[in-house]
């Protein structure tokens, strides 16, 4: 149902989470649906956790992005995205996809895309 909102590169893998990770770093894509939040707060929170990635508002009114870094920090960011968000935000649903181990970060820094 929501896959039509996901960029084509995200549809190759479904969300899965395992507690025993082979590598210490990971990456995950996300989309926030029915959302009212500031992407500036998302970028700032990613920076505060020491993550790399990006965030973008879409024309459909959703927020998409990707985060990379140590798995414990990626998990913290996922929790923040789905449960906390920016002040006075409303997040009805967070969808995570293409979660995988990486040997090192592939994106450097955290930015807002337009």
Image (cartoon, rainbow, N blue to C red):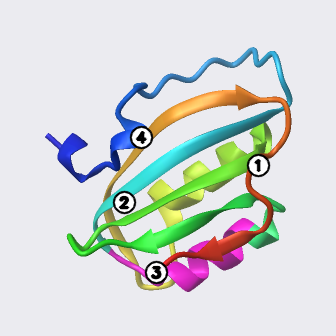
Task: Report the residue marked by disc 4.
Answer: 9
Residue to which mark 2 is pinned: 32
For residue 47, what is the image quadrant? bottom right
Q: Residue at x 47, y 84 (%)?
A: 38
Reply above or below: 16 against 26.
above
What's the residue at 57%, 84% (across, down)? 40
Do the residues under discs 1 and 2 have CB atoms within 8 angstroms?
no
Q: Pointers 3 and 1 in contact (CB under 8 A)?
A: no
Q: Which label belongs to residue 2?
A: none
Left or right: where 36 falls relative to 112: left
Question: Dot 3 surroundings within 10 Å: few (below 14), some, or many (20 or more)?
Answer: few
What residue sits right under mark 3 in the picture?
114
Q: Position of residue 69 (x, y in %)?
A: 78, 47
- Label 4 and label 3: CA atoms lie apart by 18 Å
Q: Earlier in the sequence, mark 2 or mark 3?
A: 2
Overall secondary structure of the magenta section: helix
In this view, 91 is above or below 74: below
Q: Residues within 10 Å of mark 2 (few under 14, many from 20)?
A: many
**Camera-nearest residue between 42 and 60:** 60
The image position of residue 50, as x and y in percent, is 84, 62
Count of all numbered marks drawn on residues in the image = 4
Label 4: how many residues lie within 10 Å, few (<14), some (14-19) or many (20+)?
A: few
The quadrant holding residue 1 is top left
Return the residue at label 1: 73
* N-term mark: 1 or 2: 2
First to last magenta residue range: 36-46
Q: Quick one: label 4 or label 3, which is nearer the N terminus?
A: 4
Element type where label 2 sits in the image: strand
How far is the residue under mark 4 from the one under mark 2? Answer: 17 Å
């Amino acid at each position: 149902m929501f896959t039509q909102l996901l960029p084509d590169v995200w549809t190759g893998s479904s969300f899965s989470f395992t507690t025993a990770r082979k590598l210490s770093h990971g990456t995950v894509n996300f989309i926030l649906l029915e959302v009212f939040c500031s992407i500036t707060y998302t970028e700032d929170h990613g920076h505060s956790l020491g993550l790399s990635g990006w965030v973008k508002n879409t024309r459909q009114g959703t927020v998409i992005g990707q985060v990379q870094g140590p798995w414990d920090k990626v998990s913290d960011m996922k929790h923040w995205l789905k449960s906390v968000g920016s002040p006075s935000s409303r997040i009805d649903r967070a969808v995570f996809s293409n979660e995988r181990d990486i040997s090192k970060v592939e994106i450097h820094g955290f930015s807002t895309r337009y």
